[in-house]
Image: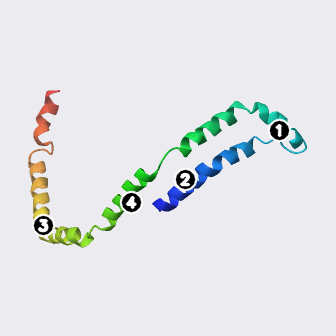
């Protein structure tokens, strides 16, 4: 995905100047005036072409190295090394969590449900 995206970006950067020039072409039947008109090219076209030149100087290689390193790290993660202990904990803690939920619910009902901050509400 990354190399494909980088390839498309590189393709855009190399083809963009020509596409921008084409966008400012004089339409037919007046296309014979193109050479005279392009001597005074529109400022927008000049700006776009200048930005394209700056983009050509940008190297995406360091960014791709970081992304590829991250990709390799993520692909190398052993999911079972995480999944197995978590599932074991889940099965062992299920009853204890249920008991804890019941205890918390009982404490809320006995104390009016407000907990430690309930007294502050009454003050204001």
Q: Which residue is mark 4?
A: 68
Residue 77: image location, x then y, percent: 28, 67
Disc 4/disc 3 C-alpha distance (Å): 38 Å
Q: Which quadrant holds residue 11?
A: bottom right
Instruction: Give the residue furthest to the top.
Output: 124
Disc 3/disc 2 C-alpha distance (Å): 50 Å
Q: Nearer the viewer, residue 113 or 96?
A: 96
Disc on the earlier residue, 4 or 3: 4
Residue 68: image location, x then y, percent: 38, 60
Q: Residues within 10 Å of mark 4 (few under 14, many from 20)?
A: some
Disc on the earlier residue, 1 or 3: 1
Task: Check contact, mark 1 vs mark 2: CB within 8 A.
Answer: no
Disc on the earlier residue, 1 or 4: 1
Instruction: Tell me the mark number nearer the camera, choosing from 1 and 4.
Output: 1
Disc on the earlier residue, 4 or 2: 2
Q: Residues within 10 Å of mark 2 (few under 14, many from 20)?
A: few
Give left or right: position of 61 versus 85: right
Instruction: Give the residue furthest to the right.
Output: 29
Give the SS element for disc 4.
Answer: helix
């Amino acid at each position: 995905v990354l190399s494909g995206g980088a390839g498309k970006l590189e393709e855009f950067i190399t083809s963009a100047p020509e596409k921008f020039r084409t966008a400012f072409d004089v339409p037919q039947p007046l296309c014979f005036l193109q050479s005279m008109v392009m001597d005074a090219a529109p400022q927008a076209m000049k700006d776009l072409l200048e930005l394209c030149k700056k983009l050509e100087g940008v190297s995406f290689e360091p960014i791709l190295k970081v992304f590829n390193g991250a990709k390799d790290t993520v692909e190398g993660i052993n999911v079972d090394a995480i999944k197995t202990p978590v599932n074991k904990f889940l099965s062992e803690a299920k009853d204890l969590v249920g008991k804890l939920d019941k205890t918390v619910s009982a404490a809320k009902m006995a104390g009016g449900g407000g907990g430690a901050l309930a007294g502050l509400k009454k003050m204001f």
